[in-house]
Image: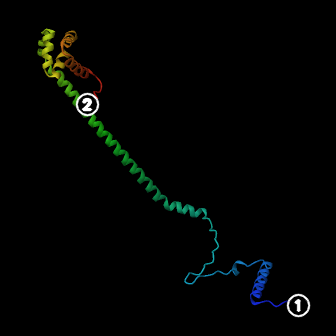
Amino acid sequence: MIPSLSSPERRRALLLAALAAMSVSGGARAEDTVRQVLPGAQPAVAPQQLTREKAPDQSEIERFCSNIADAARDRRYALQAEELKQLQAGIDQRMKALDEKKAEYESWLKRREVFLARAEDSVVKIYAGMKPDAAAERLAIVNADLAAAILMKIDPRKASVILNEMDQKAAATLTGIMASAARRVDPS
């Protein structure tokens, strides 16, 4: 005989029997699962099966490519045109810099010619005929550019004696001017 069970014990026994029955039958299926929905929440949506889309066939690909070919070509031409504009701007900038440098060189050449023309032959002859110590004293007082031009036109031996008689600072200044004027390359 089976002893009588109390109400809580009876519930527990029924629950265990139900669990045993489920485990024997293979458990609950996905369709049988119960989902709890909270009040005010949206009902749970069953997950959708992913479907594999059919790959486009070759004719669709060719049609797509032919449809966008003109747009792609136009875009490529636009990019190339933009790149050419940038290159042209760079070339224009370099041309401007070269023109500025050319003007600077022409100005320098003109100043050199003016510098050499200052020392006229008559003035050169006067200083060439002076005693070296007297010529050195006078050339130290004269404008440095003019003094250097005169010394460049005098015989080199005579000019070296005159520079030797000058004070060191004046001789160094005149020598620097004469060296830069005699240079045949870029002054900068």
Q: Are marks 2 and 1 in contact (CB under 8 Å)?
A: no
Residue identifier under label 2: 105
166 with respect to 188 (left or right): left
The image shows residue 112, relative to residue 103, as above or below, that is above
The image shows residue 99, relative to residue 45, as above or below, that is above
- The colour mode here is rainbow
Residue at figure coordinates x 38%, y 47% from the top left: 84
User: Could you give the CA–CA distance between mark 2 and mark 1, rounded to whole angstroms?
Assistant: 128 Å
* Residue 12 percent across, percent down from the top left: 76, 84
- For marks 2 and 1, give the one nearer the viewer: 1
In the picture as drawn, the residue positioned furthest to the right comes out as 1
Q: Quadrant of residue 40?
A: bottom right
Q: Which of the numbered marks, if any, corresponds to residue 187?
A: none
* Residue 179 percent across, percent down from the top left: 25, 20
**For the residue marked with disc 1, what is the amino acid?**
Met
Q: Residues within 10 Å of mark 1 (few under 14, many from 20)?
A: few
Q: Quadrant of residue 96?
A: top left
Compare marks 2 and 1 and give the one earlier in the sequence. 1
Residue identifier under label 1: 1
**For the residue marked with disc 2, what is the amino acid?**
Tyr
SS assignment at label 1: loop
SS assignment at label 2: helix
Residue at figure coordinates x 67%, y 81% from the top left: 34
63 with respect to 99 (left or right): right
